Image (cartoon, rainbow, N blue to C red):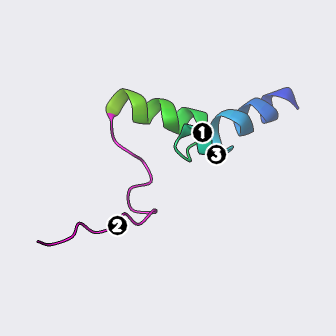
Amino acid sequence: MIDDWIEYYNNERYQWQLAKLSPNEYYQYITTGVYPLEGVIKQPKEQIR
């Protein structure tokens, strides 16, 4: 039961304080600089001048 909680806590529990990522995804994001949800969250388009 404890192993299940640890698995959930580190891999599935998304947090707003961690850029809307799970702890493991946030660690990957910080170490590589690649945001894993790039295609999922729509970014505003840059305005054309």
**Would residue 9 appear left or right of 36 to someone viewing this image?**
right
In this figure, which residue is indicated by the disc labeled 2? 44
Q: Kindly indicate the quadrant of the structure image that contains residue 5.
A: top right
The mark nearer the N terminus, 1 or 2, is 1
Asked whether the residues under the numbered discs 1 and 2 touch, taking CB atoms below 8 Å apart as contact, a structural biologist would say no
Q: Amino acid at mark 3?
A: Tyr
| Residue 19 at x, y percent in the picture | 52, 43
Query: Residue 14 shows which numbered tag?
Result: 3
Mark 3, mark 2: which one is toward the viewer? 2
| Residue 17 at x, y percent in the picture | 60, 39
**Would residue 43 appear left or right of 22 to someone viewing this image?**
left
The mark nearer the N terminus, 3 or 2, is 3
Which residue lies most toward the left here? 49
In this figure, which residue is indicated by the disc labeled 1? 17
Extent of the magenta region: 33-49
Q: Residues within 10 Å of mark 1 (few under 14, many from 20)?
A: few
Mark 3, mark 1: which one is toward the viewer? 1
Q: Secondary structure at mark 1?
A: helix
Q: Secondary structure at mark 3?
A: loop
| Residue 33 at x, y percent in the picture | 33, 36
Which residue lies most toward the right here? 1
Q: Residues within 10 Å of mark 2 (few under 14, many from 20)?
A: few
Question: Is residue 42 a member of the stretch shown in magenta?
Answer: yes
Q: Nearer the viewer, residue 5 or 16?
A: 16
